[in-house]
Image (tube, grey):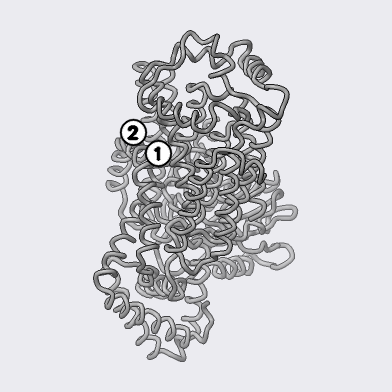
Amino acid sequence: MIGWLIRRAADAAVWAYFRRIDSDGLEHLPKKGALILASNHINALVDPLVIQFVAPRRLTMTAKASLAKNPYGGFLLWAFGAIRFQRPAESGVRAAAAANRAAIEACRARLARGEALCVFPEGKSHSEPAMLPFKQGAARIALGHDGPVAIVPVGLYYERKERFRSAVGVRFGPPLDPLQDQQSASELTREIRRRIEGLTAHFEHRREAILADWVGHMLASEGAPPPALRDEIPVTEHAKRLQRIADRLEQLRPTSGPELTALETRVAAYRQELRRLGVTPEEIYLRIGWGRALHFVIGELEILLVGGLIGAWGWIVHLLPFLVVRAVTRRFSRERDQWASNAICPALVVYPFFYVLQMVVAWILLPVPWALAFTLSLPFSGLYYVLWRDRVGGAWRRTRTFVRWYLDRGLQSRLANDGRILIRDIMALADGTPE
Amino acid sequence: MVVIVLSFNLPQLLGSWLLHLGILAGYAILMPVTSTRATLRAVITIGVMFTLYFTLAVIPFEAIPWLADAPLSRADEKLFLGVNPALWIEPHVTHGRLEFFSFVYALFIPYVYLSIFIGLVGRPDRERTAFVNGIALVYCIGFLGYLFVPARGPVVFLASEFAAPLQGGMFHDTIVQSVANCGGPHGAFPSLHVGVACFLCFFDLHWNRLRGLTYVPVVLLIAIATIVTRYHYVVDILAGAIIAGLAYRVARGRR
């Protein structure tokens, strides 16, 4: 029961933390039978939670045992039924080897019961632009399992993983059958890596990754006006585009080094100018017409005013737990891949605690109908507030851009022209490979 | 239909058509190049629905030889284990609450018109078609109820059982006047206030989630308001919500 509650709370926390959670390739997940999901690992504890959020069946997590040193971490591992692996650096080579043999057996026992495992072959979370070397645990689990098991590669992509209300995309690839395809653990590990690489983008440097991300947004805009605020492009589409850009970059680097460098310099300068103006690549092509502006204002004002009441209520009743979680997150987060975990994990207990506290006070002080209304309003207004906040933020940014372009049509025209030329040159260099 | 349209309440009919022509003109000004034909079709469909709504006040009561108030009221009592909700709620309706719920009841009009405006302007064609199909279906099924289950609602049927008529302020007087202008209480089953509001909410929850969520509390309050103001039985509300769900499923399927 506690495990079930924590898992539901984790789903709610993941939903609230991310603005969008898009998935792709869910049809590759077998509905039943032994299954291993092997994923890249770039956002600590959030990675398994996000995969579990989109997966249609319950997953058994694997985690490093050192998480249990912290009592709360230990509680979460217990609640999720996670299987713990030791790291040699933390517990010594022999002790780790013995413990991990037992953990692998535990994984095989779960597979024998037809369950699904979620493993991260890199072994630890990181913020590098490319994947770390793979460990062979996943392959050994699969090869030692008696009976059929499917290994499904998973590619995770985070828009800005350290930022609240950013977006995440989860891509599932076609399953591979370890008994048919591979012989040894090392061969199977290489194949798993190749499959995950096929679902993620890899770069040599972080700067290159940032520029490629920007180029992805530029290409997605296609030099056309941005979609309505409620019609975002799925993150998985951007992840695919980014992967194609990364692949093409790798192909071009040996043959077109100077052209590539020149183009990178131009993209960087363009990006810097847009960032200084606070404009996204899509908004450069915003249409400036009073009819459209009026329609936009009517729609957004309605949300702002009618929804403002619910949004304000949601903000008031969630402010205290939000501040507590934010303080904890800031206190304990050092690396980029820690922020989301350090926000979501405390939220699993802080928000329910404040909910219970407020409900107790409400049921003591208020008549039954009002107490009931208050109780129902808590989750609804919280859910509403995060959506309302995103929308108002987007509307404000777009309004500011509209006014900026309206006052300086020449600037918009120049930037739009520069953007289209850049897109054309990128496409020419890439020979049309990225769409 | 032509007979109905020509026979009743010409000023309101003209008003209704002028409103929709206004929407069309507004659209033409705002979005001069996008799918004028589709929009024209949408505006005409909704115009016809609204015209029927305004003109169906009297016909069923003259053409159909029965009134459905008694069975509807009995259904309410069965639903609430022998208690009539319209009578039960009476002592809880203070002057302030009546004014509040009258205001909520009146909110339906700006909600539906704003939704239609947003539904017709600036949407992709397929989405607009789904919207128009759905809303037309809600009205069509609702009109069948108006025609074959004619009822005037608790405000008329239970008038003698209430301790006193409702005494509100500005907002209540306004809705009483508006209902009188539409031919008096009629068309209780199903509640199109709830049916249309639910459909708009369901539709937005799918295509424009934030707007849908924004109006969830409003739709719930509208449903309560129809009971508080004595215009509907609870079964009318349930029927309205079911019709909305059905229309939404059909509209979504025809995307």
Tell me if mark 2 has few (under 14), some (14-19) or many (20+) residues whose alpha carbon lies within 10 angstroms of its own: some
Residue drawn 32% across and 78% down?
A: A413
Residue type (three-letter) at the residue carrying disc 1: Gly
Residue placed most toward the observer, B30 or B56: B56
Relative to A54, does residue B40 appear above or below in the rendering? below
Does the CB distance between marks 1 and 2 fall below 8 Å? yes
Q: Local crowd at mark 1 within 10 Å, few (<14), some, or many (≥20)?
A: many
Is A143 displayed left or right of B86 in the figure?
right
Q: Are marks 1 and 2 on the same chain?
A: yes
User: Along the horizontal axis of the image, is A60 left or right of A315?
Assistant: right
Residue A95 visible:
no
Q: At which x and y percent is residue A87?
A: 46, 53
Cα distance in 3D space between marks 1 and 2? 8 Å
Amino acid type, residue under disc 2 in the picture: Val
What residue is shown with label 2?
A: A317
Using the image, name the chain to which the residue with label 1 belongs. A
Say if A123 sits above or below B82 in the image. below
How far from the left and from the top, in percent, is residue B205?
A: 52, 45
Residue under the image location 48 percent in, 23 percent down: B229
Q: Residue at x 39, y 45 (%)?
A: A386
Query: Mark 2: which secondary structure?
Result: helix
Residue that numbered label 1 is attached to: A382
In the image, B4 versus B255, the foreground residue is: B4
Between A390 and B198, the residue placed more toward the observer is B198
Q: Position of residue A16 (x, y in %)?
A: 43, 45
Q: Describe the element under mark 1 as helix, strand or loop.
A: helix
Tag count: 2
Quadrant of the image occupied by residue A415: bottom left
**Of label 1 and label 2, which has the lower sequence position?**
2
| Whole-percent x, y for residue A278 in the image | 28, 65
